[in-house]
Image (cartoon, grey):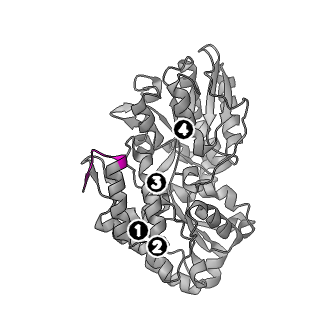
């Protein structure tokens, strides 16, 4: 879930505008684009946006939005018929915005005519009730990131199972082997690895408190109990603590996504970028690790007066050429299959390492309430890792919260 998973508020400055929520005019001229990518990635997206506008014969105004407030800001603006013409939306936001009527139905536009080149999982996030409301921008998932030198010095290979991670930890100095982030998104590899899920959307059932999920969270808890991992008891700063521990070399392994690589390469442990290793997340058995599909999509605001220019803009931003340029510069993962055949993309070590991960990533429930499933799980997962609750009791609480607050029409499965 990229920046959402971090829990870190990004304070961004406007690029080419004052960050206003005003509509940017007519189809003869200007597209306002709200970019939520952050300080590491924003300049690259802004450059491509301006290149697209120059080639397309329209103007673009790129305004940066802090990720943690972007959705609320967009909804407030769109409700009043204002806001950007194009918005970079986290994949879980699309069905919610479509249900609210805040994004345009693109089903009859050129953007939905030929989607065969897009990867199946990110393409799924663009749909709501059989219609197309978005175009995939970047995709991502979680992987095991490790300090090659530390593992080599200890004589261990990147673990493929949680038991192998425990065995490796004994040679890596115990709990400093692995930092376990206590955020909800990072609980998903333990849940998906056991074959579990949060909800069964097709059956309208809540399955978050299943036996599989209980087993998954117990596995995470056991890593702490066996001194094979450490975590932060401060749920609000867990991600920041993880970043610092891995960047400095204090932790030998973490689970994170491609968005985090730029920060890691600024740390002392990875002054030599070749020291950063990337492997699939471990699972209960080898080859059974599974991580969630994440990423971002482009949406066009319903009622924009610059719809045709916005369509041209999204076509350019989501093109193979643009995706290849972003992958080359930032190591972000393309959503187009053919982009992975580009020589520059193939040469990017981060993309090459994450590509096989995305092919087996677990698709999430693309429902309007999808983004709301994480808050109750975040509390429960942090409580489990802190020893405040047993996995079964914690997940029963999550199921109850889902029923009462999130998917009220679902039954507890």
Name the residue that disc number 4 marks.
Answer: 72
Q: In front here: 360 or 308?
A: 308
Query: In the drawing, what numbered circle is on residue 205?
Result: none
Image point 71% across, 61% down: which residue? 265
Residue 145: quarter of image = bottom right
Name the residue that disc number 2 marks.
Answer: 160
Q: Position of residue 399 (x, y in %)?
A: 33, 57
Q: Residues within 10 Å of mark 4 (few under 14, many from 20)?
A: few
Name the residue that disc number 3 marks.
Answer: 375
Secondary structure of the residue carrying tag 1 is loop
Secondary structure of the residue carrying tag 2 is loop
- Mark whose residue sits in front, 3 or 2: 3
Describe residue 101's horizontal placement relative to residue 237 as left or right: left
Name the residue that disc number 1 marks.
Answer: 287
Q: Is residue 171 above or below residue 24?
A: below
Cα–Cα span, label 2 and label 1: 7 Å
Q: Is residue 74 above or below residue 405?
A: above
The magenta region covers 405-412
Q: Residues within 10 Å of mark 1 (few under 14, many from 20)?
A: few
């Amino acid at each position: 879930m990229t920046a959402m998973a971090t829990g870190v508020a990004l304070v961004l400055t406007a690029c080419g505008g004052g960050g206003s929520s005003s509509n940017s005019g007519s189809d003869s001229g200007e597209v306002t684009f709200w970019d939520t990518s952050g300080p590491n990635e924003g300049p690259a997206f802004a450059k491509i946006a301006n290149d697209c506008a120059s080639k397309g014969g329209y103007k673009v105004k790129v305004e940066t939005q802090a990720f943690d407030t972007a959705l609320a800001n967009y909804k407030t603006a769109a409700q009043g018929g204002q806001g950007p013409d194009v918005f970079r939306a986290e994949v879980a936001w699309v069905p919610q915005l479509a249900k609210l009527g805040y994004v345009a139905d693109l089903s009859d536009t050129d953007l939905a005519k030929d989607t065969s080149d897009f990867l199946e999982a990110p393409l799924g996030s663009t749909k709501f009730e059989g219609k197309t409301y978005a175009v995939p921008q970047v995709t991502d998932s979680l992987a095991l990131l490790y300090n090659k030198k530390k593992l080599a010095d200890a004589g261990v290979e990147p673990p493929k199972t949680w038991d192998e991670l425990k065995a490796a930890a004994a040679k890596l100095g115990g709990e400093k082997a692995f930092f376990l982030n206590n955020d909800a998104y990072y609980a998903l590899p333990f849940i998906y690895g056991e074959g579990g899920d949060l909800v069964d959307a097709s059956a309208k059932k809540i399955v978050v408190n299943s036996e599989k999920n209980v087993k998954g969270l117990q596995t995470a808890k056991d890593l702490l109990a066996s001194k094979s991992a450490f975590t932060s008891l401060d749920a609000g700063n867990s991600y920041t603590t993880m970043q610092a521990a891995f960047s400095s070399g204090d932790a030998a392994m973490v689970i994170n996504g491609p968005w985090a690589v730029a920060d890691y390469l600024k740390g002392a442990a990875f002054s030599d970028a070749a020291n950063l290793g990337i492997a699939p997340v471990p699972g209960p058995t080898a080859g059974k690790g599974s991580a969630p599909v994440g990423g971002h999509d482009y949406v066009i605001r319903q009622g924009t007066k610059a719809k045709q220019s916005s369509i041209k803009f999204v076509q350019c931003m989501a093109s193979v050429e643009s995706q290849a340029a972003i992958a080359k510069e930032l190591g972000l993962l393309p959503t187009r299959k053919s982009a992975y055949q580009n020589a520059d993309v193939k040469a990017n070590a981060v993309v090459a390492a994450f590509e096989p991960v995305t092919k087996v990533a677990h698709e999430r429930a693309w429902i309007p309430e999808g983004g709301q499933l994480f808050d109750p799980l975040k509390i429960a997962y942090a409580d489990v890792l802190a020893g405040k609750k047993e996995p079964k009791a914690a997940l029963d609480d999550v199921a109850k919260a889902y029923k009462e607050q999130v998917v009220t029409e679902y039954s507890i499965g």
